[in-house]
Image (tube, helix red, strand yellow):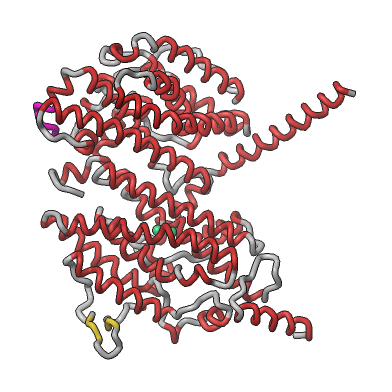
Amino acid sequence: MLQHTVQTCIHSDTQLKYLLQLADNALILSHRNSQWCGHGPILEQDIALTNIALDQLGQARNLYQYAALLLTEKTGITTTEDQLAYLRDTGEFKNCLLAELPNGDWGQTVMRNFLISSYQFFLYQELQYSNDGQLKAIADKSIKEITYHVRWSADWVVRLGDGTAESHARMVQALELLWAYTGEMLEPCDYELPFIAKQSSFIKAAWEAKIAAVLAEANLIHPTNDWMQSGGKKGIHTEHFGYLLAEMQFLQRAYPGLEW
Amino acid sequence: MDQTANQLQDQFQQRIDLEQKIEPKDWMPEKYRQTLIRQISQHAHSEIIGMLPEGNWITRAPSLKRKAILLAKVQDEAGHGLYLYSAAETLGISRDEMYEQLHSGKAKYSSIFNYPTLSWADMGAIGWLVDGAAIMNQVPLCRTSFGPYARAMVRVCKEESFHQRQGFECLLQLSKGSEVQRQMCQDAINRWWWPSLMMFGPKDDESPNSKLSMQWKIKRFTNDELRQKFVDMIAEQIKLLNMVLPDPELTWNEQTKHYDYGAINWEEFKQVIQGNGPCNKERLEARKKAWADGAWVRDAAIAHATKQAKRKAAAQTYSAKETE
Ligand SMILES: [Fe+2]
Ligand SMILES: [Fe+2]
């Protein structure tokens, strides 16, 4: 577990919560994508998705390292990226539920990536104007990668939505399943407000327009259900998430305090 | 064999002897082509199957840095598979045919990947020993007589030596760690040492294909020569880890200036090749499942591309009519 002082510090600091939320989304999505490595439907695409997982892991690390630095300064207790990733329990992770859902088939995986990457694209575009120099630098670096993630995943959504009757049916199903988890990304929670209060309605509108355009190109009917699941940002996760962390954190938990 | 065939044969061997590269469009003996297809595709399959044992630890890597290194490494292996499938394709076999041969069990892959990865230290041991043995085999292949294979191997070897260093560094970290970590490290070395020696293939006097491959300069060193080089290298490097190799007979021989080593269990080697290794079934099943589960994706990609092409053609006809 994180030291109590560090935990309390995170708890009372909106900036830290905000950074961790960004980092957790990147890490958990990377983790899910990395599960495809070696099992993809086409060798070139196995490589492409692993590349994306690596980008997302890199983004997560930059954010955790920044948060760890702030925590070290504020508490006087040396804090590391690994402590933040490996020593927090489910309730302390702030990623959206959408990022943690199981991969499902290839269609569900590319659809999830498309929905999240598109959001990250408009969000990080705004973060490039952040007053926080460090966050701005991370956004500058990430936006190039995310631009590619959006293009890659949108191409796949179109390909599969338009492809065969089977692929179309699978994409309809994927969209139906995932749609209810998109709202959480777009509604800023209390600790996000100080950072994106002004921009959030623009981000939401831009995201909606992007999604509508790609779904139309993919011959997929835009979902109409507007009941949205939420909780991840507040630490209330799906049942899947505990297993994800149990696996990811296994070595750090079984053999605490070692260097690897 | 008639006159011209004999001439071609002679010219071919002359070019080989002059160290000229054979390119896909050049004449080559059918046996040379078949030998290469078998060897390159087997090599490609090994890269792809080889993703599985290490892939087994991607979601459990103990730090974010290690996770990134491992993920990038396994991805590199996929890239190696890709280069090698492309090189084999220049000899007139398609990637789908090669997959078919792998899935049906007709094509082999390196037996080392039929062993399980049981602890984190296995990631280090594989990098150090398995990638290390692979390099010994592959560095001479950078000068192999078939051009596309040689060029693919140049790219592969650069990355493999990086993998080996990372693997060693992973073990070095463990060797400096707690008692538990040191045990993990030694245990992984114990399990991977003998299988990695088997990666060089049967002893020279029992290696049926070697002679012709040497004559054609597909191979440049014998199995035993490469194995000895590897033993000599690892026997030195292990000192830096303060670990031991699980071979009581391993000793420096002042006369030969090489390390002597104990007898390899060739019965185990034979069993694993025949499909009785601990993970043969799982490895092949995982590949077959990925292929079967991906069928609808590949079909859809083709269907979409076809539709797109039709739409484009229709749009062109339409605009041509417009401007008439
Ligand atoms: Fe490789
Ligand atoms: Fe390698």
Where is residue A17? Give x, y as percent: 24, 21
Residue sitting at the far right:
B324
Q: Is residue B106 visible to the viewer in this orientation of the structure?
A: no
Q: Foreground: B129 or B18?
A: B18
User: Which residue: 48% across, 42% down?
Assistant: A48
Q: Quadrant of the N terminus of chain A?
A: top left
- On screen, residue B38 versus residue A234, left or right, reads right
User: Which residue: 20% across, 55% down?
Assistant: B173
In reply to whether residue A2 is colored magenta, the answer given is yes
Where is residue A213? Give x, y as percent: 57, 19
- On screen, residue A59 versus residue A254, left or right, reads right
Name the image quarter holding residue B144.
bottom right
- On screen, residue A226 versus residue A212, left or right, reads left
Q: Foreground: A156 or B293?
A: A156
* A241 in relation to B200, above or below: above
Where is residue B2? Give x, y as percent: 78, 85
Q: Foreground: B106 or A250?
A: A250
Name the image quarter holding residue B147.
bottom right
What number of labels is visible? 0
Name the image quarter holding residue A240.
top left
In reply to whether residue A156 is colored magenta, the answer given is no
- On screen, residue B64 versus residue A105, left or right, reads left
User: Which residue: 44% across, 27% down?
Assistant: A117
Provide the residue span drawn in magenta. Answer: A1-7
Where is residue A251? Give x, y as percent: 20, 46
* B286 in relation to A31, above or below: below
Q: Is residue A246 visible to the viewer in this orientation of the structure?
A: yes
User: In which quadrant of this rendering is ligand 2 seen?
Assistant: bottom left
